[in-house]
Image: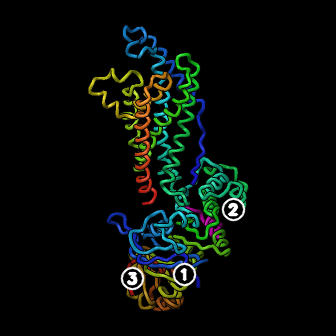
């Protein structure tokens, strides 16, 4: 069964946004941080620019995929009824769940490649590990988008979406190890970061680019992200069925 | 006689405590146009969605093409064309793209889909709009795109949920004409409507639904002869004065129906009844004699005040 959808990938955005983040934070904040007396110890000997920018593939993927799983997905369920039209054909709700997952993956891949290309311009982040970081970004994006799609399909209004961004996505962005190693967090907060998908995605992407990832750890991160995706997909199968075939 | 295309026995659909469809039985034969007629909330759409295999039955038996929706939903849906109550078109895509992409859901090869789409757009008279996006089209045009799209898989059975609701009279007639042509080609149509004229125009046979139950079944003509008289005399005595005349008026007809603004007298000879009333010096503000229609059947069956 094929599920298709046409979209205009915003290539300009895919390049422009990471460049802004890189220049704004990587270089700006980096200049301050690298002057700190023990910054080398905290950042494993890498510059702040390398540390921060290597997480970008994961954080950008999180934003792109999450947004896609909220309003545009609500459109298919509630406003254009596109998914209803699909399920009046041989396509079943579970196929819509699979199709959406593929669509989120495609969209995140474009974004992740965009970031990878930008990072390839900088000496500190130019490595073959960028190639491995792209799938790491895609997994991160899906670990957000797929469970969020299950949520979206159970809603009739987008009222809950801004709070989701404000209280789930943004805090993860701030506390998920993108800006500083989570060891810097208060001890009680550190375990919280361990269960968030973003931290696993950030570690995976960063470890791949800077080639600092111990083998077992990499598998663990991939495993956690995949668990989010698989559980999210299973939730989607249930909630999509309930929504489309009441 | 072939097996019926659709068979329903004691079919029930509940949403929590709400009983939307309450033990209905019906058969739809190959090649007929079958209608569900009823007010909003009568259970028409729920019945249609169960037939379309997008809503599980609560209890009872339902077979489409001799298959069960629970076990063979996919296979049944592959042979059905659905025109939903509200258009579910992709507004950002062109008319042609809407058809071709929809065909892909049926695994129809792209070139076959293109050829069929061209034919279908000719059929619904939208060939010159094929490269326009759907968004700016009129309601009637969008509905025709929906019909063309539902035909792309060459379905054996078409489900049309209120196909002309919200369209202007001219657009309705264009649509009826297309549906009539489909019927002539041998398509089996199942439609819901709350328009009596639509049911009379299109349906060979129909069931009248009210409160989740089927309250009558037959051809439009049959229903009219069974549940109404040949003619109806409509009289207005002015607001608030209609009721005063009920007892006098009921002597000249078989039945009287009191509506807020007028009295309906069911009689074999409407003009005769009116003449009799005039002789008795009962003069309405205005009077009209017409043939009875499904509307009258409907009024009788769906529980409006009846005075015999």
Asked whether B9 or A187 is in front, the reply is A187
Q: Nearer the viewer, mark 2 or mark 3?
A: 2
Please give the count of numbered marks on the rendered protein: 3
Mark 2 chain = B
Provide the secondary structure element on which disc 2 rests.
helix
Report the residue marked by disc 2: B120
Image position of A236 with respect to B263: above or below? above
Which quadrant is home to the C terminus of chain A? bottom left
Report the residue marked by disc 1: B220
Crowding near pointer 1: few (<14 within 10 Å), some, many (20+)?
many
Mark 3 chain = B
**x and y percent of residue A91 in the render?**
54, 57
C-alpha separation, residue under disc 2 versus residue under disc 1:
30 Å
Residue bounds of the magenta highlight: B165-176
Crowding near pointer 2: few (<14 within 10 Å), some, many (20+)?
many
Q: Nearer the viewer, mark 2 or mark 1?
A: 2
Report the residue marked by disc 3: B306
Q: Main secondary structure of the magenta part?
A: helix
């Amino acid at each position: 069964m094929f599920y298709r959808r046409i979209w205009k990938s915003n290539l300009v955005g895919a390049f422009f946004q990471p460049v802004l983040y890189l220049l704004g934070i990587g270089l700006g904040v980096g200049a301050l941080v690298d002057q700190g007396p023990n910054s080398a110890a905290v950042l494993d000997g890498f510059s702040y620019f390398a540390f921060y920018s290597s997480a970008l593939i994961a954080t950008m993927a999180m934003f792109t995929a999450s947004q896609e799983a909220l309003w545009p997905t609500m459109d298919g369920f509630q406003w254009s009824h596109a998914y209803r039209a699909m399920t009046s054909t041989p396509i079943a709700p579970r196929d819509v769940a699979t199709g959406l997952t593929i669509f989120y993956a495609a969209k995140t891949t474009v974004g992740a490649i965009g970031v990878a290309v930008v990072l390839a311009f900088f000496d500190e982040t130019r490595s073959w590990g960028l190639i491995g970081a792209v799938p790491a970004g895609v997994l991160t994006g899906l670990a957000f988008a797929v469970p969020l799609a299950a949520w979206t399909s159970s809603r009739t209004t987008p009222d809950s979406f801004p709070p989701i961004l404000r209280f789930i996505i943004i805090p993860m962005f701030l506390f998920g190890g993108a800006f500083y190693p989570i060891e810097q967090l208060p001890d009680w907060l550190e375990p919280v970061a361990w269960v968030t998908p973003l931290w696993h995605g950030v570690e995976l992407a960063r470890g791949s680019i800077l080639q600092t990832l111990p083998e077992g750890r990499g598998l663990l991160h991939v495993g956690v992200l995949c668990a989010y995706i698989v559980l999210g997909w299973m939730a989607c199968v249930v909630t999509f069925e309930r929504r489309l075939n009441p | 006689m072939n097996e019926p295309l659709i068979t329903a026995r004691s079919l029930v659909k509940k949403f929590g405590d709400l009983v939307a469809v309450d033990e209905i039985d019906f058969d739809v034969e190959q090649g007929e146009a079958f209608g569900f007629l009823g007010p909003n909330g009568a259970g028409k759409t729920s019945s249609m969605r169960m037939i379309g295999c997008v809503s599980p039955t609560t209890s009872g038996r339902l077979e489409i093409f001799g298959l069960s929706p629970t076990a063979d939903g996919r296979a049944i849906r592959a042979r059905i064309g659905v025109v939903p109550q509200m258009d579910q078109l992709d507004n950002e895509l062109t008319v042609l793209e809407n058809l071709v992409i929809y065909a892909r859901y049926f695994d129809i090869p792209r070139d076959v889909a293109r050829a069929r789409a061209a034919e279908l757009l000719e059929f619904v008279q939208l060939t010159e709009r094929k490269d326009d996006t759907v968004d700016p089209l009129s309601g009637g045009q969008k509905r025709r795109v929906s019909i063309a799209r539902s035909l792309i898989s060459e379905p054996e059975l078409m489900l049309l949920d209120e196909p002309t609701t919200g369209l202007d009279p001219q657009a309705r007639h264009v649509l009826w004409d297309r549906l009539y042509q489909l019927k002539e080609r041998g398509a089996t149509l199942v439609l819901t409507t709350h328009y009596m004229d639509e049911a009379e125009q299109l349906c060979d046979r129909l069931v009248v639904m009210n409160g989740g139950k089927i309250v009558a079944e037959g051809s439009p003509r049959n229903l009219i002869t069974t549940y109404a008289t040949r003619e109806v005399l409509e009289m207005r005595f002015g607001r608030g004065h209609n009721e005063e005349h009920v007892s006098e008026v009921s002597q000249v007809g078989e039945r009287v129906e009191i509506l807020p603004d007028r009295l309906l007298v069911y009689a074999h000879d409407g003009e005769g009844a009116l003449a009799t009333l005039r002789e008795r010096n009962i003069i309405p503000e205005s009077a009209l004699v017409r043939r009875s229609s499904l509307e009258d059947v409907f009024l009788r069956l769906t529980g409006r005040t009846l005075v015999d």
